[in-house]
Image: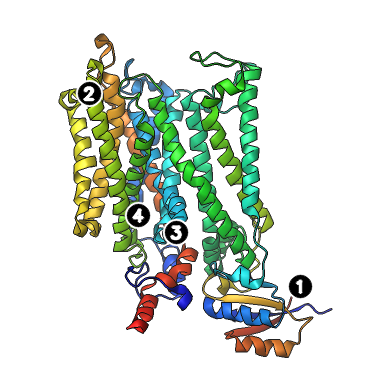
């Protein structure tokens, strides 16, 4: 027992009287059982939204992007807002599994699997927007550096948009591999439990024949550690490069050197908020309250407070600098008196309310440890972070250097429909995942059970008294 | 020659660790141990050599970096130089700052993917591979130690394993 010592002051991460076998049973239950009514309701709603989105995408591709609310001055609006929003959400997963692994934060084990799934599904949604916005998505492969029919006209490696192609595709593929490698032992567990032959076949295929030899585990741990080391700078680079799409331009409000750290903090902020939203529902639906505990919620809220604080300071800096330059152009950026009192004032104030004011409630410990309040605040942050991107993009573009080009962006039903469609698509993927995948990294949780399980902690601490 | 192996099952990782130490003290070679989760220190106790996968990752990363340098140089400087925003394109080095993100991403891409492929190849795991754990309980809550009999006395070995706290001992003809 002595090798499993953890300070008694630390709260247990696994509640209840659990044995290794109990963990197996608990994680396998949602997969082996039947879906309940709530699952079908949620799935149907998501599917309808997804189909509606497909309709809007087809309409856009068939008719052209003139069906969106864009005009010659605001050439980017909802699509790029949604792109950045989804990429931002896609940041928490790999952050949880990679950065928290490097920092030896054991609480990650209950949430990393779902957070990574969320990452991958969110990056799918993000990737859709630039492809649709190309207008001719069947030529999407032109962003790849491959020889083509125009002789050898290559892609432009000086462009931040191309950096984005490389960053996001690397991020997606590395996250996918990281996720899948972690899933192998858990799929193997499901394979060895499966009674129906079809289920057994599927999980045997998915588990790649994982057998759990001592040498495999040694390699597995090394690979996880090195992948975490590689993924950590990768996560930071992805949103840095996304921010460069804006920061390397010459528009006042976009041409800002604080964009990279500020965007990365914002991405982690929104990503954790989305994890909080999804797990708030999932822990209830799948009866995993003993694994995703109040303590996990509190830790996530602390990350949200920290990154939210960075974002708030970044807003204040942007606001102050815009005013301090004395340049009249700066008075039309997204963080300025002009924005607060202009036609997009409602969007400005929504950002302030949802992203700065509401998250401050988390300073109160009672709120931070409350499931329902954390859930509501996380939804507010999701909305706030969408407004942040909308403000940066639409407000800045609506008032450029030449007043005769000033324009206003109004979304059409197609803009809104595609956005709703991606939320539906995300929901469909996540709900299917929750029914078929082991939603908690059970092998990892088993390895900390003796250290951090409630019954083991009690047994150990009792000995000291 | 008979290919008999003995399978000792344990239901606790601490008992398993003690058992491994006791078996190793008698200089008996442990063929394999199947566990449901990573047991820390087990590889050292069994006498497994450390894995060199991290070294391969570093080398694959260097390959990725080299590839990205070759690619940007060939495409942007040699094959079709373009004047983009007045950025200097006479030599790769002058244009290099704009290529740093690409070089970084390719380094990570190569290191991560090829390391994982190497891991899959070395551990012989891939789609359609059938599992080789001898007992399905080893992915749930049991730990299985496999020792071949041909160099050892079967009865002595069985009693030794019984002493170490094995919950089940089976002698199996391995094909």
Disc 1 versus disc 2: nearer the observer: 2
Q: CA distance from mark 3 to mark 1?
A: 42 Å
Q: CA distance from mark 4 to mark 3?
A: 38 Å
Residue located beneath label 2 in the image = A324
Vertical comparison of A104 with A321: above or below: below
Task: Indicate the secondary structure of the residue bearing disc 1.
Answer: loop
Residue located beneath label 1 in the image = B175
Chain label for disc 2? A
Residue located beneath label 4 in the image = A40
* Left or right: B151 as drawn, with respect to B9: right
Badge 1 crowding class, 10 Å Cα cut-off, few under 14, some 14 to 19, many 20 or more, is few
The answer to the question of whether label 4 and label 2 lie on touching residues, with beta carbons closer than 8 A, is no
- Going from the N terminus, do you reach mark 3 or mark 2 first? 3
Residue A267 in the image: x percent, y percent?
A: 36, 41
Disc 4 versus disc 1: nearer the observer: 1
Q: CA distance from mark 4 to mark 1?
A: 48 Å
Q: Quadrant of residue A371?
A: bottom left
Residue B165 in the image: x percent, y percent?
A: 57, 86
Q: CA distance from mark 4 to mark 2?
A: 55 Å
Residue B32 in the image: x percent, y percent?
A: 67, 71
């Amino acid at each position: 027992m002595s090798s499993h010592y953890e300070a008694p002051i630390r709260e247990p991460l696994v509640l209840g009287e659990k044995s290794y076998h109990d963990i197996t049973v608990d994680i396998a239950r949602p997969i082996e059982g039947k879906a309940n009514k709530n699952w079908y309701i949620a799935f149907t709603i998501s599917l309808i939204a997804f189909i509606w989105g497909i309709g809007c995408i087809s309409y856009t591709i068939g008719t052209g992007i003139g069906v969106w609310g864009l005009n010659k001055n605001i050439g980017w609006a909802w699509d790029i807002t949604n792109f950045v929003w989804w990429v931002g959400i896609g940041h928490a997963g790999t952050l949880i599994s990679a950065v928290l692994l490097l920092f030896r934060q054991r609480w990650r084990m209950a949430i990393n699997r779902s957070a990574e799934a969320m990452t991958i599904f969110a990056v799918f949604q993000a990737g859709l927007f630039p492809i649709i916005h190309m207008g001719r998505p069947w030529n999407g492969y032109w962003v790849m550096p491959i020889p083509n029919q125009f002789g050898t006209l290559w892609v432009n490696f000086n462009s931040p948009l191309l950096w984005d192609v490389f960053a996001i595709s690397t991020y997606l593929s590395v996250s996918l591999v990281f996720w899948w490698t972690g899933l192998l032992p858990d799929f193997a567990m499901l394979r060895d439990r499966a009674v129906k032959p079809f289920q057994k076949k599927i999980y045997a295929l998915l588990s790649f024949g994982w057998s759990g030899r001592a040498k495999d585990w040694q390699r597995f741990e090394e690979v996880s550690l090195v992948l975490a080391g590689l993924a950590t700078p990768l996560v930071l680079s992805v949103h840095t490069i996304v921010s460069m799409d804006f920061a390397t331009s010459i528009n006042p409000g976009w041409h800002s050197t604080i964009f990279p750290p500020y965007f990365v903090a914002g991405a982690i902020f929104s990503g954790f908020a989305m994890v909080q939203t999804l797990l708030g529902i999932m822990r209830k639906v799948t009866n995993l309250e003993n694994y995703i505990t109040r303590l996990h919620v509190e830790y996530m809220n602390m990350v949200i407070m920290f990154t939210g604080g960075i974002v708030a300071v970044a807003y204040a800096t942007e606001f102050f600098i815009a005013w301090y330059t004395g340049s009249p152009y700066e008075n039309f950026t997204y963080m300025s008196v002009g924005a607060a009192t202009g036609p997009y004032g409602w969007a400005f104030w929504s950002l302030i309310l949802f992203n700065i004011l509401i998250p401050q409630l988390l300073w109160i410990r009672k709120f931070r440890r409350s499931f329902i309040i954390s859930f509501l605040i996380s939804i507010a942050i999701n909305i706030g972070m969408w407004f942040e991107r909308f403000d940066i993009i639409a407000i800045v573009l609506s008032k450029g250097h030449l007043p005769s080009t000033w324009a206003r962006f109004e979304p059409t039903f197609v803009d809104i429909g595609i956005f709703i469609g991606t939320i539906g698509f995300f929901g469909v993927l996540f709900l299917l995942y929750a029914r078929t995948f082991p939603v908690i990294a059970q092998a990892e949780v088993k390895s900390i059970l003796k250290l951090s399980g409630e019954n083991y902690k009690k047994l150990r601490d009792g000995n000291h008294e | 020659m008979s290919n008999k192996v003995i399978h000792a099952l344990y239901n606790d990782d601490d008992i398993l660790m003690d058992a491994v130490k006791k078996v190793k003290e008698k200089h008996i070679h442990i063929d394999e141990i199947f566990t449901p989760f990573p047991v820390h220190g087990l590889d050292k106790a069994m006498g497994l050599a450390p894995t060199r996968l991290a070294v391969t990752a570093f080398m694959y990363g260097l390959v990725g970096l080299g590839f990205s340098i070759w690619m940007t140089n060939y495409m942007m400087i040699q094959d079709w130089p373009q004047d983009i925003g007045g950025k200097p394109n006479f030599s790769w080095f002058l244009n290099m700052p704009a290529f740093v993100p690409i070089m970084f991403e390719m380094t990570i891409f190569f290191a991560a993917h090829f390391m994982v492929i190497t891991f899959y190849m070395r551990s012989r795991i891939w789609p359609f591979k059938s599992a080789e754990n001898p007992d399905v309980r080893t992915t749930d809550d049991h730990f299985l130690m496999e020792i071949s009999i041909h160099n050892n006395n079967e009865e002595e070995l069985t009693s030794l394993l019984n002493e170490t706290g094995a919950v089940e001992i089976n002698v199996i003809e391995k094909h």
